[in-house]
Amino acid sequence: MKTILLVEDTEDYAENLKYVLEQEGYRVVIVMNGKDGLEKAMHIRPDLILMDVLMPVLDGVQATALIREHTELKDIPVIFLTAVTAGDNVVMNVQGKDFPAISKMADQQQLLAKIRQYVGD
């Protein structure tokens, strides 16, 4: 079973997304900010990280930059979750590296398709 670390500070959105992903057979671990996301990633070594952009304590861009500094975490795919609705091929740039992003308003099938690109079924 693939493990997804969901770093999201909006509890209702996180719980709804967790439910959807668990129905697809993924194990989902939720944390509410980037600092906790970094710590949890080091502990569980997820197959994928879904990272909110704007969060308290440590935002998604800062957290991803710190994750990339750890040799044991640097190859874990990160998909950013953003409130921006700007089409299918949105990317976030963190320290010169592009990461895929998907709108929180995207339908479930779009999100699941994006996740499968990086971790499969």
Image (cartoon, grey):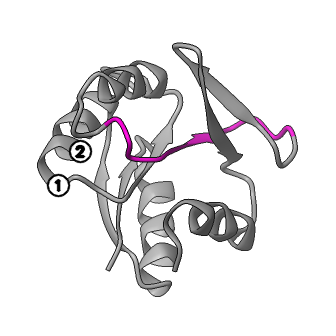
Q: Bounds of the magenta span?
A: 74-86
Q: Residue at x 40, y 40 (%)?
A: 9
Count of numbered tags: 2
Q: Position of residue 52 (x, y in %)?
A: 50, 38
**Quadrant location of residue 46?**
bottom left
- Look at 24% across and 31% down and name the residue there: 71
Q: Position of residue 78 (x, y in %)?
A: 48, 43
Residue situated in front as seen by the camera: 34 or 73: 73
Image point (25%, 34%), residue name? 38
Residue matched to label 2: 41
Mark 1 Cα-neighbour bin, 10 Å: few <14, some 14–19, many ≥20: few
Question: How far across and how far down the image is residue 61, in percent?
Answer: 48, 22
- Amino acid carrying label 2: it is Ala
Residue at point 68%, 69% (across, down): 113
Image position of 67 with respect to 65: above or below: below
Residue 97 vs residue 69: left or right?
right
Q: Is residue 48 left or right of residue 20?
A: left
Q: Which mark is residue 44?
A: 1
Q: Identify the amino acid type marked 1.
A: Ile
* 102 versus 12 height, above or below: above
As helix, strand or loop, the secondary structure at mark 1 comes to: helix
Residues tagged 1 and 2 counted as in contact (Cβ below 8 A): yes
Q: Position of residue 2 (x, y in %)?
A: 35, 72
* 51, 9: nearer the viewer: 51
